[in-house]
């Protein structure tokens, strides 16, 4: 009902706007007074954490894209390999698991059967399973060795939004905790990153406050498009996949999300006059070599007539001349950028669905939680 939606026209709209809170709440209470991470709630011994030499993330849908984002951060911080595997693929390929493997099962609902079966398999092989979950007392955390809850609050809309950003935060906390107990980073380094995380709710809020109009005009311009392409590099790659998923889920637009470096290896053949291409632009700071590579990707698709939509950092003036429209987001470190880059993509999918008169919260053929294999 309208009351439950708190004045919003859809649960998705409400949940998109709850993301600053979801991030803040997921960070809350997970630090000591002196600023060190405290994950005592995760019932796995420090000794066990210290022995971990590989992480495998298992998840489906949006949760898997959150896992892909976390891979970049955790490998960088902890220097141990992180694999991300779709839960339904994982179990049937004889994965290499042992007691030094930490399996992280990410699930908003905690009831996804594919993820549940995969974690059971991992535990049978002697691996520890740590769940990241948004639903207290659900099956996946109950069957895991331990859980770190995301505190995003109930997510009603089928298309996941606030759970995604909260999952990234939770996975980052696990990564930083591992870095802390393994001594992989200096305390000050970890604290600086924690400060960066704490700055994110206000940055998400800023995107929500300033970008709605630009997103709406892009949706209006492209509402009749038959298909959309999304591209990004590094952490922008899973964000591109997530943006593509949102648009197909609720606007029923055929989309593909891919790594920008793959453009020349195939997808560029799809680009024709008027094709909308959404590009996640990495920060330009520090002479980031990826920045110029992504700009040339925009140039290439635009030369073939694409309508280019860029998601870029405030102050990145170079982007203006390349893109037909820019969604701006505040400056932040690269590893934090998914938390702000995804926001306009969620809004874009919602606006497109609205313009098409579709049921935003209950798209056809989909369930909020898939409890069958
Ligand atoms: C379904 C939903 C998706 C969700 C996926 C995983 O397919 O429609 O939005 O990302 O399941 O759900 P989970 O509850 O395990 O995160």
Image: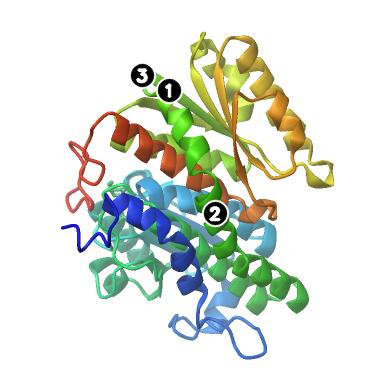
Q: CA distance from mark 1 to mark 3?
A: 5 Å
Mark seen at residue 222: 1
Disc 1, SS: helix
Q: Look at the image and tell me whether residue 168 can be seen.
A: yes
For residue 62, above or below residue 28: above
- Expressed as whole percent of the image width and height from the top left, the position of residue 238 reads 52, 42
- Please report contact status of discs 1 and 3: CB closer than 8 Å, yes or no: yes
**Which residue lies under the disc numbered 3?**
224
In front of the other: 175 or 320: 320
Which badge, 2 or 3, comes first in the chain's sequence? Answer: 3
For label 3, the SS is loop
Q: Is residue 78 left or right of residue 130?
A: right
Q: Quadrant of residue 326?
A: top right
**Relative to 340, is 122 on the left or the right?**
left
Relative image position of residue 24 (x, y in whole percent): 50, 71
Q: Is residue 61 above or below residue 275?
A: below
Q: CA distance from mark 1 to mark 2?
A: 24 Å
Residue 359, located in which quarter of the rendered image?
top left
Q: Residue at x 61, y 66 (%)?
A: 197
Can residue 126 be seen here?
Answer: no
Does ligand 1 reach within 8 Å of label 2's beta carbon?
no
Q: Point out residue 108 in the picture as x, y percentages from the top left corner.
A: 33, 60
Q: Quadrant of the N terminus?
A: bottom left
Position of 52 with respect to 179 (left or right) is left
Circle 2 packing at 10 Å, graded few (<14), some (14-19), many (20+), is: many
Observer-nearest of 207 and 182: 207
Per the model, the C-alpha gap separating discs 2 and 3 is 28 Å
Residue linked to disc 2: 339
What residue appears at the point 48 percent right and 36 percent down from the top-left corner? 215
């Amino acid at each position: 009902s309208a009351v439950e939606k708190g004045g919003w026209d859809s649960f998705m709209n409400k949940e998109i706007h709850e993301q600053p809170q979801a991030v803040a709440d997921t960070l809350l209470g997970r630090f000591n007074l002196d600023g060190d991470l405290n994950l005592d709630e995760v019932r796995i011994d420090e000794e066990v954490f210290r022995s971990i030499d590989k992480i495998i993330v298992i998840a489906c849908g949006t949760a898997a894209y959150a896992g892909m984002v976390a891979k970049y951060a955790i490998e960088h911080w902890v220097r141990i390999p992180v694999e991300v595997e779709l839960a339904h693929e994982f179990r049937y390929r004889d994965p290499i698991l042992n007691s030094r493997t930490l399996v992280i099962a990410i699930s908003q609902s905690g009831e996804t059967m594919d993820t549940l079966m995969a974690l059971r398999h991992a535990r049978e092989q002697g691996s520890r399973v740590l769940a990241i979950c948004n639903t207290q007392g659900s099956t996946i955390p109950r069957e895991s060795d331990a859980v770190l809850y995301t505190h995003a609050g109930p997510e009603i809309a089928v298309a996941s939004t606030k759970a995604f950003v909260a999952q990234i935060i939770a996975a980052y906390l696990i990564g930083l905790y591992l870095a802390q107990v393994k001594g992989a980073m200096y305390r000050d380094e970890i604290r600086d990153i924690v400060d960066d995380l704490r700055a994110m709710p206000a940055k998400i809020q800023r995107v929500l406050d300033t970008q709605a109009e630009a997103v709406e005009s892009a949706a209006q311009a492209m509402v009749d498009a038959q298909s959309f392409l999304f591209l990004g590099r590094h952490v922008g790659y899973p964000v591109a996949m997530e943006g593509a998923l949102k648009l197909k889920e609720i606007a029923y637009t055929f989309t593909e999300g891919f790594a920008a470096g793959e453009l020349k290896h195939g997808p560029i053949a799809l680009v024709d006059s008027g094709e909308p291409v959404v590009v996640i632009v990495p920060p330009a700071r520090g002479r980031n070599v990826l920045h110029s590579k992504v700009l040339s990707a925009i140039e290439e698709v635009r030369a073939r007539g694409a309508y280019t939509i860029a998601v870029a950092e405030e102050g990145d003036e170079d982007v203006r001349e390349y893109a037909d429209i820019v969604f701006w987001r505040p400056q932040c470190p690269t590893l934090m950028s998914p938390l702000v880059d995804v926001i306009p993509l969620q809004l874009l999918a919602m606006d497109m669905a609205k313009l098409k008169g579709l049921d935003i919260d209950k798209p056809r053929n989909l369930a909020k939680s898939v409890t069958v294999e």
